[in-house]
Image (cartoon, grey):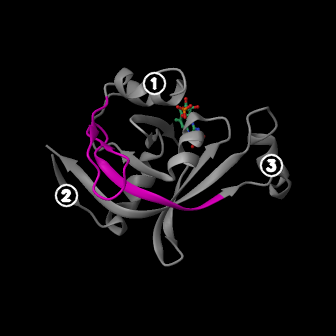
């Protein structure tokens, strides 16, 4: 499968727009690959490096996998895609099932890291975690606390992923 290199400065707007309705973050530990839907993400430059920051709640299986492998891919749809992919990856846990198979996703050999891209969500950022930050609940203002952290949902952990490769998977 071919990969067309992209410059993230030219497609940052497309990635941010795709966060609603959702994109995927994919992790891999051993032979196990797991994708989770995300709606939050930050794309920018930090420490003189291109960076994607993902916000992952404590209880996610993705959080456990990220802490083990410290690498991830960001997978963004282009044009039409099957909506049930976001539904399955955003409601089921990889702890209980193989979401890659259930959602009909096709892993594609990565370029730099060990985590694959996904043919069905072809715009791919390969990221290496350079910083992990647990959010401190005492630092939120009241409005954010009320809206996001009053239930037993767990705080978010920020994973700062240096983008080490960026491309679109093509047939
Ligand atoms: C549209 C949408 C956006 C979501 N965004 C996030 C997010 O940014 N961070 C997060 O931790 N969970 C988010 N979730 C929830 C996870 O995708 C969901 O809990 C998933 O089942 C976790 O999978 P895992 O246990 O395999 O990691 C989102 C769900 C949906 C439907």
Instruction: Between residue 61 and residue 124, name the one nearer to us.
Output: 61
Q: Mark 3 to mark 1: distance in Å? A: 30 Å
**Of 78 and 112, the residue lying toward us:** 112
Nearer the observer: mark 3 or 1; the answer is 1
Looking at the rendering, the stretch of residues picked out in magenta corresponds to: 105-132
- Specify whether 115 is left or right of 110: right
The disc label shown at residue 37, or none: none
The residue beneath circle 2 is 4
Q: Does 82 appear in magenta? A: no
Q: Does the beta carbon of the residue at mark 3 sit less than 8 Å from ligand 1? A: no
Question: In the figure, residue 152 lies in which quadrant?
Answer: top right
Q: Are marks 2 and 3 in contact (CB under 8 Å)?
A: no
Query: Circle 3 — which element?
Result: helix
Where is residue 120 shown, x and y percent of the image? 28, 36
In the image, ligand 1 is in what quadrant?
Answer: top right
Helix, strand or loop at label 1? It is: helix
Q: Residue 106: image x %, image y %? A: 27, 33
The answer to which of 64 and 163 lies nearer the viewer is 64
Q: Is residue 111 inside the magenta stretch?
A: yes
* Residue named by callout 1: 88
Q: Single out the residue that lies furthest toward the front.
A: 30
Q: Earlier in the sequence, mark 3 or mark 1?
A: 1
Mark 1 burial class by Cα count in 10 Å: few <14, some 14-19, many 20+: some
Using the image, determine if residue 76 lies above or below residue 104. Answer: below
Front residue of 72 and 168: 72
Residue 143's disc is 3
């Amino acid at each position: 499968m071919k990969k067309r290199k992209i410059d993230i400065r030219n497609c940052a707007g497309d990635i941010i727009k795709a966060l609603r309705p959702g994109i995927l973050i994919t992790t891999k530990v051993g032979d196990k690959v797991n994708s989770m839907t995300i709606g939050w993400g930050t794309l920018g430059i930090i420490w003189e490096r291109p960076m994607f920051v993902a916000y992952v709640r404590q209880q996610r299986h993705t959080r456990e996998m990220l802490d083990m492998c410290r690498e991830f891919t960001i997978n963004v749809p282009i044009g039409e895609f099957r909506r049930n992919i976001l539904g399955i990856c955003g409601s089921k846990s990889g702890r209980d099932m193989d979401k890659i198979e259930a959602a009909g996703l096709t892993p594609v050999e990565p370029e730099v890291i060990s985590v694959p891209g996904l043919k069905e969500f072809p715009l791919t950022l390969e990221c290496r975690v350079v910083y992990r930050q647990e959010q401190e609940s005492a630092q939120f203002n009241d409005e954010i606390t009320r809206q996001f952290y009053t239930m037993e949902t767990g705080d978010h952990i920020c994973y700062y992923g240096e983008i080490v490769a960026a491309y679109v998977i093509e047939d």
